[in-house]
Image (cartoon, rainbow, N blue to C red):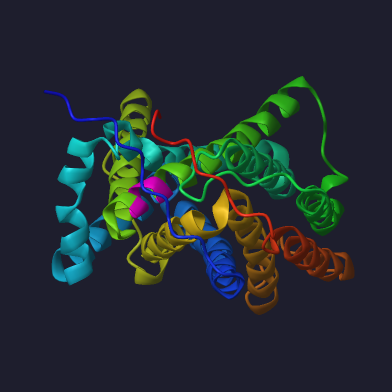
Amino acid sequence: MSAPNVPTPAAPPASPRASIVFFVLAVAAGCVLPVQGRVNAALAQAAGDPVLAALCSFTLGLVLMVVVSALTRSGRRGLAAVRPALAARTVRPWYFLAGAIGGVLVLAQALTIGTIGVAVFTVSVVTGQVVGGMLVDRLGLSPAGVRHLTPRRLIGAGLALVAVLVVVWPQLGGADVGPLWLLFAALPLLAGLATAEQQVLNARQATAYGSALPATLTNFAAGTVALGLVWVALSVLAGSGPPNLPSDWRLYISGPLGCLFIGFSAVAVPRIGVFATTLGLVSGNLVGSLVVDLVAPTAGSHVTAMTVVGTLGALAAVTLASMPSRRPAEAAPVSRR
């Protein structure tokens, strides 16, 4: 007899004070991304292979999550809840593919930045994330339920996108726009849209298990498999020999940083929704990028007055859009997914 189609349990609604805490958690997760990106870029340059660098990041994150899940009580309890959740159909097997979306984003970064640049890549991804976050919240796909598109949220989202454009505007002037360029710019936009669904799947798992650890582990497992297959295929086609990895341990910390990012996001989404979490990630990303460029500048980093103004503007816009609504969230229609 098949198990009944039980809806994914909804997370308890967060109070305004708790919403601020979870939003700050999303900002902290966003601050991790620039550091992770800088480390990944350094590893890709040292190894001469961006796909291999991404594979190392995911593999180390997977190893760390296996260890943490096995050695902690909450990790073991979360893993024990996986089979009952699958049997009750509150978690579907294809939810485990969410980590492959992270792999797609990393591949999009490796494939497109050389053509469109970091600035256009950032604008495309952020646009996809904000639009995707609004859509999945309006449809009520996450455990947070339906989040209505109020004028305040729409204005805040628009101002956040404008602020991102202000930050990257100095780098956009040299873009050589053409059909191929537009095609490459569309890839990170689609990847950004997909990350909204990734956050939904992670949040559903975290809610069903009562812990974000199993969802984080399955993310890294799926991403590792996907990137491993791509790397093997490319190596066979190119006739490459064994990988030549650098020995500096600092180049391998992006995996643990990714664990923090996925775990924090999975905890925040059920309480404040995908859209508010995405805005927190965007603001944290901008602030983290500004700090990283100030503390450890590279040849391609330029911190200007527009960078600072745009970052502060993004924070103001995000604060406006993410303020808790007085209208309660509706039940999330997530049982048929």
Query: Residue sitting at 51 percent across and 51 percent down?
Result: 144
Which percent across, then down, holds residue 14? 52, 65
Whether 56 is drawn above or below 64: the answer is: above
Q: Quadrant of the C terminus?
A: top left
In the rendered view, does 29 fall on the left or right side of 278?
left
Residue furthest out toward the top: 179
Badge count: 0
Residue 303 falls left or right of residue 58 = right
Q: Quadrant of residue 319?
A: bottom right
Q: Is residue 105 left or right of residue 303?
A: left
Q: Is residue 204 magenta?
A: yes
Q: Residue at x 63, y 61 (%)?
A: 280
| 270 to the left or right of 79 | right
Q: Residue at position x 88%, y 65% from top?
A: 306
Figure check: 65 above or below 336:
below
Q: Quadrant of residue 89?
A: top left
- Magenta residues: mostly which secondary structure? helix
Can residue 164 be seen from the camera position used here?
yes
Q: Could you say which is closer to the camera, residue 57 or residue 210?
A: 210
Q: As drawn, which residue projects farthest toward the bottom? A: 295
The answer to whether 182 is drawn above or below residue 150 in the figure is above
Percent of width and height locating residue 164: 78, 54
Identity of the residue drawn at 60% across and 72% down: 20
Q: In the rendered image, which quarter contains the N terminus?
A: top left
Q: Nearer the viewer, residue 163 or 267?
A: 267
**Residue 324 location (% of width, % of height):** 67, 63
Q: Position of residue 216 (x, y in %)?
A: 34, 54
Range shown magenta: 203-207
Magenta-drawn stretch contains 217: no
